[in-house]
Every structure is written in structure tokens, then in C-alpha cells.
Amino acid sequence: MTTNAAPVIGFVGLGVMGGPMCRNVALKHAGEVLAFDTSLAPVESIQDTKAQRVQSLAELAERADIVLLSLPGGPAVEQVCLGPHGLTSGVKRPPIIVDLSTTSVAVTRSVSQRLALLNVSFADAPVARTREAAQRGELSIMVGADDELFERVKSVLAYMGSDVTHCGATGCGQVVKLINNALVFENTLALAEMMVLGERAGVQPATLLDAVSKGSGDSFVLRNHARKSMLPRLYPEKSFPPEYVLKDIGYVLELAQQTGVNTRVTELANRYYAATAAHGWSGRYFPAVIEVVDRNIELAPIATN
């Protein structure tokens, strides 16, 4: 570990969420902050901070005490942590790796166990809320780690999140995050159906949302996804697309199968978002699922073994 009072923090992955998270770390942390991304363009988002760009994961591993990851999913996390050119491939390994990505519970626990054999501590700390919340440093962060490791990383996580919750042992952060995401996706779909139904029955969508927001049907999804995207029918690119929804739902369905739970609502949502990706909204913001509802697009049949 570094002899300085403040640990050196490394950050891998400067994408839609990773960029603003790294920026907050660089602005608030007293010590050095190192950043790595395979693409040059994302690094530009932190150029006006003290974060230093490094050229390789090996350099990051050599210098950092704590490495934060914000990556697309489980395979990328495994590659960065344990691959032939990853953080643990050299003689010097970072003592602590914290994964801010959303991955499967099984992958998280497997990576943690393999890193433990290399004397590297691992915490899963997936994040929730919007890109705007990431920019403000107001994410909700759900952490899976033992008590000692949580105490060591919670102050670093507080640079990025206004709510940092210790959910239990390794993998429990991912469990909570996947459930959170499934609830968002399913609520978005339910609101899409009701907005289309209400409009066809004579109620303007804006009026519907105003009225429902004053009652027990109010929700985060109504105030954000419905008002900002489904109401104006705006689905920008470089937001959270249906393909990412399908990835997360796939993790939920995998966990459900492993635990013996029938998740039929989630299975239905999976079919709707698959149709969203397949019928013209690939790469667009996932509340575009309302277009599938509005157009009565046929859903693919449930796959049978």
C-alpha cells in the first residue's frame, strides 16, 4: 500500500456512467487518481480534473491501492480482473478491486473467490439512478462485501453516491441491483401499457401522469422515464438501450433459475424489450418499449427446451 495518507485510486471504464463517477472521485479525493479506458474519447471527459490517464491495466495495477471498475458486464469484469493482460497478471496486484458494474451474481462470486487466491480483496458495488445523478455524485450504491472491506471502501464510494448501502456478503450488492433494475424495467412497461390505454380511452398522457402522480400510483419511473422520455416520445442514443435491459434481465432470470423462483413478470418484460430491440429501437433509450405497446407489435414466443 502507498505510504501516503490517502490511497491511490484507479478507475477503469469511462463510459456513460463511469466517466462522471471517475470525475467525482478525481474532484473529491485527496490522493492521486488514475484513469484507464481502451478508447481515447471518454478520457477527454476528465481532462480538466487531476485524474491522470495511464496507458495500461498493468500500470494501473502497479500504482493503485484501490481500483474501481465500471464495465459493460461480467465477461469484461473477468477479463480486466483475471485476463492475461489484466490487473492481476503482473507481479504487483492492487490490494482492493471494487466493481461498480452490473454483472451476474455467479460471475461476481466466482471472480471474488479467484481473486482471494491471489490476495486481492473484491467488493461488488453496482450503482443505480440516472446519468444525471452520477454527474451530481448522488447515485445509490449497493455493496456486497465483508464488514471489514466495506469499512475500507465506503468513504471512496461516498464520492460517487449519496446512498451507500451494505447489502451483505459478496454478490449481495448484485442481487439488490438486479432486483432494482427489474422493478424499473417492469414498472416502465406497465406505465407504457397504461399510457397507451388511457390515451385510447380519451385521457391525454400528460393529464394521466399528472393525476396518477398525486395518488398511490406515483413512482420514480413515472416522474423520470415516463415524463422525460415516454411522454415526449424521445429515446436518445447513448443512453440505456434495450440491449442493456436484456443483459440485466438475463442475469435476473439466471438467478431465478438458480434459486428456484418462477419470475413470470420478468419473463414477459424480457419479451417486450426483445421486441423493442428488434423492431427499430436498437441502441435507443429503453422506454421506447411504449412504441411496441402502441403498435401492438407481436412478441416472440417463449422459448421452450
Image (spheres, rainbow, N blue to C red):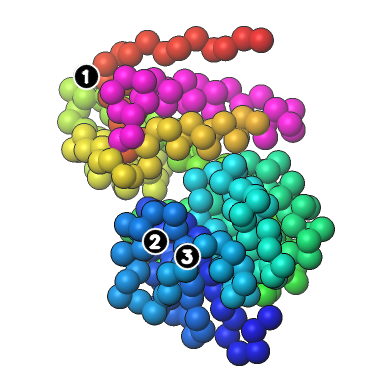
Type of the residue with mark 3: Gln
Depth check, front residue: 237 or 35: 35
User: What stretch of residues is rendered in magenta?
Assistant: 255-284
Residue extending furthest right?
117
Type of the residue with mark 2: Gly
Q: Are marks 1 and 2 in contact (CB under 8 Å)?
A: no
Q: CA distance from mark 3 to mark 1?
A: 56 Å
Q: Which mark is residue 200?
A: 1
- Between circles 3 and 2, the one closer to the viewer is 3
| Residue 45 among those drawn in magenta | no
Q: Residue at x 30, y 75 (%)?
A: 48
**Location of residue 33 with respect to 246 vertically, above or below:** below
- Between circles 3 and 1, the one closer to the viewer is 3
Q: Residue at x 74, y 33 (%)?
A: 259
Q: Residue 287, how many percent across, how many down?
A: 33, 35
**Location of residue 276 with respect to 163 vertically, above or below:** above
| Residue labelled with disc 2 | 19
**Location of residue 19 with respect to 270 vertically, above or below:** below
- Between circles 1 and 2, the one closer to the viewer is 2
Relative horizontal placement of residue 36, taking residue 126 as reference (left or right): left
Secondary structure under the numbered disc 1 in the rendered image: helix
Type of the residue with mark 1: Arg
Q: Which mark is residue 55?
A: 3
Quadrant location, the N terminus: bottom right
Q: Residue at x 31, y 44 (%)?
A: 238
Secondary structure under the numbered disc 2 in the rendered image: helix
Q: Are marks 3 and 1 in contact (CB under 8 Å)?
A: no
The mark nearer the N terminus, 3 or 1, is 3
Q: Are marks 3 and 2 in contact (CB under 8 Å)?
A: no
